[in-house]
Image: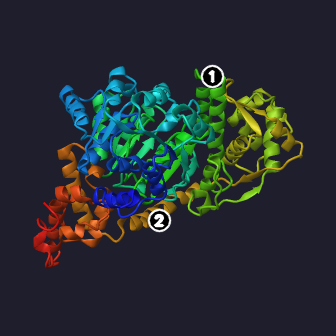
Amino acid sequence: MSELVAAQAALKSVFGFDAFRPGQSEIIGALLDGENVLAVMPTGSGKSLCYQLPALLRPGLTVVVSPLIALMRDQVRQLQQLGVEAAALNSSIEYDEAKRIRQSMRDGKLKLLYVAPERLVRPDTAEMLTNAGVGLLAIDEAHCVSQWGHDFRPEYLRLGEIREQIRASQTIALTATADGPTRADIVDKLFRLAPRTFVRSFDRPNLHLAMQPKDNARKQIAAFLESHRGQSGIVYCASRKKTEELATHLGLAGYRTLPYHAGMAQQDRDANQDTFMQEDGIVIVATVAFGMGIDKPDVRFVAHADLPANVEAYYQEIGRAGRDGLPADTMTLYGLDDMRLRRLQIEEGEASEARKRIERQRFNALVALCESPRCRRQTLLAYFGESSESCGRCDLCQSDFEVFDGTVEAQKAMSAILRTGERFGTEHLVNVLTGSATEAIRRYGHDTLKTFGVGKDRDANSWRSILRQIYAAGLISLDIVEHGRWTLTEHGRRVLRGEEKIELRTDVANRAVGKKAKRRAVESAAVQSGGADGSLLTALKALRTTLAKAQRQPAYVIFPDRTLIELASLKPTTKDQLVGIHGIGEAKLKRYGTAFLDVILRHRLANGVDGGAGSGSASGGTGD
């Protein structure tokens, strides 16, 4: 039997999957052939399986470098549930457990060991692994090694040196977000020779992408969540204070909300995260302190109450939705205040000028995405070097807006900027354009300018949108130090002189957002349920929650939603029938088969459906 055939067999018997996801078999094949690998795969595409499955088929220990204890804990629990010998070494491990892990390594029983980079670089850990026979070193979140990555961590810089020290036979580096410069840096820092590089499409077609200009963030977030009642989701905020306030506000509106930010006590953060992972229908309102390592597959939405830090952060954060491949919603609010704050954070940071230049470019890409006059997905993928057709599914593809020749409007706005001395911010300029003779306008004599009232045909919101769009297009520059004053760029001056034209879009009509979101939620629910019996699915989820709480582990470690949906649709009555269900391998069949079959049989009896000839074999069939 070839190694790839053996991998296919283990995929079913251990993990309960009938087929590889796109890209997995090629990466696994390269590792089984002895090659080193760099894998860039979008969140939810099954990166972990690419090293977990080879670890079961090859001799030696697989060491997995992971930056977060929570992620290690969850992956180890999941592997143990599948009957795989796996463990983690980190600061949360008790002495006796660490001793047991070392003995298991000496006995050659341990297949996967998860280690934090800080722990791996310790001399005692490296020495222990040198004698353990490491066959594969898997480096997760590999973008952390690069100074150009959005989440650089100094500890990752020593991993190439440690790989040599522990004499790992092979290396695989994995990440979901790495542009060209970051990939080159990863190869330079982690590999002696260029590895086989696999770059999967960054497209997440199951995610609905949407963005809105910020008006009233609380109302906008509440309207978005209205179509997601009873579902699990994440709402990101820029500050700890806003996190607390929005969590309280949404809680009063009837949502099961929990806050999460770095200012909370560790035990409170852990408790809220555990509740989110173990129960259905929890909305976490969080700063970016929450997210990396959260592998919950059934997050149905991610909303941003404030603009993310850059386009990579945006991509990574929305990527926490829909990891199970089922439809999920994203919505991001943005405003000029957000833009000014983010730029200020870049300029006042302690990074080098080269690093700041990269951060400015990445933030500019996010601003351009917000004000894009075309398909969101098309614009986002273009940033990662992919070309695509209009998706037909994002808010811009589905909204009633038009692209028009906005050269005259841009010239009016830039003329107002110039005639007021390039000294004023958005609201003052909007008042000049709309002819609003405020006290400040009269004090500076701006009511006598030729541009005063030149934009009366548009309302204030339209002019705010135009200013954002010509900013995103590079026609004007925002001075973040001097109170957000606008100045013209050389590109803007060319447009002002009529040497170039600019296309703008009418602002996306927010009035249709609620109805469309509800309609999309109904359509998504139909896809998610897959024809499942609703009351049976609820009963299966209740059992899963009970088991997860009893075992103090995430609900998806028992079974993901997709497995429960198949159970509620097909209603198997024997363990032999369970074998064909997605996500049910041999170990989970033995551990949970009887309990879930009992729920199905009780449901059939309660609804007057005969359990059939196999109804008495719930505890028989394929193991106990």
Front in this rendered view, residue 56 or 361: 56
For label 2, the residue is 519
Image quadrant containing the N terminus: bottom left
x, y (%) of residue 22?
48, 59
For discs 1 and 2, the disc positioned in front in the rendered view:
1
Q: Kindly identify the amino acid type of the residue bearing the numbered disc 2.
A: Arg
Q: Percent from the top left, x then y, of residue 366?
A: 61, 42
Above or below, 89 relative to 452: above
Of the 4 image quadrants, the one containing the C terminus is: bottom left
Residue 416 shown left or right of residue 337 in the figure: right
Relative depth, front residue between 34 and 112: 34
The answer to whether residue 254 of the structure is visible from this angle is no
Query: Exactly how many numbered labels are in the figure?
Result: 2
Q: Residues within 10 Å of mark 1 (few under 14, many from 20)?
A: few
Question: In the rendered image, which quarter is residue 287 located in?
Answer: top left
**Can I make out residue 411 in this image?**
yes
Name the residue beneath numbered marker 1: 352
CA gap between label 1 and label 2 equals: 48 Å
- Left or right: 59, with 145 as reference point: left
At 56% from the left and 37% from the top, the residue drawn is 193
Q: Which colour assignment does the render follow?
A: rainbow
Picture layout, residue 189 above or below residue 291: above
- Of the image marks 1 and 2, the number of the one nearer the N terminus: 1
Whether 612 is drawn above or below 427: the answer is: below
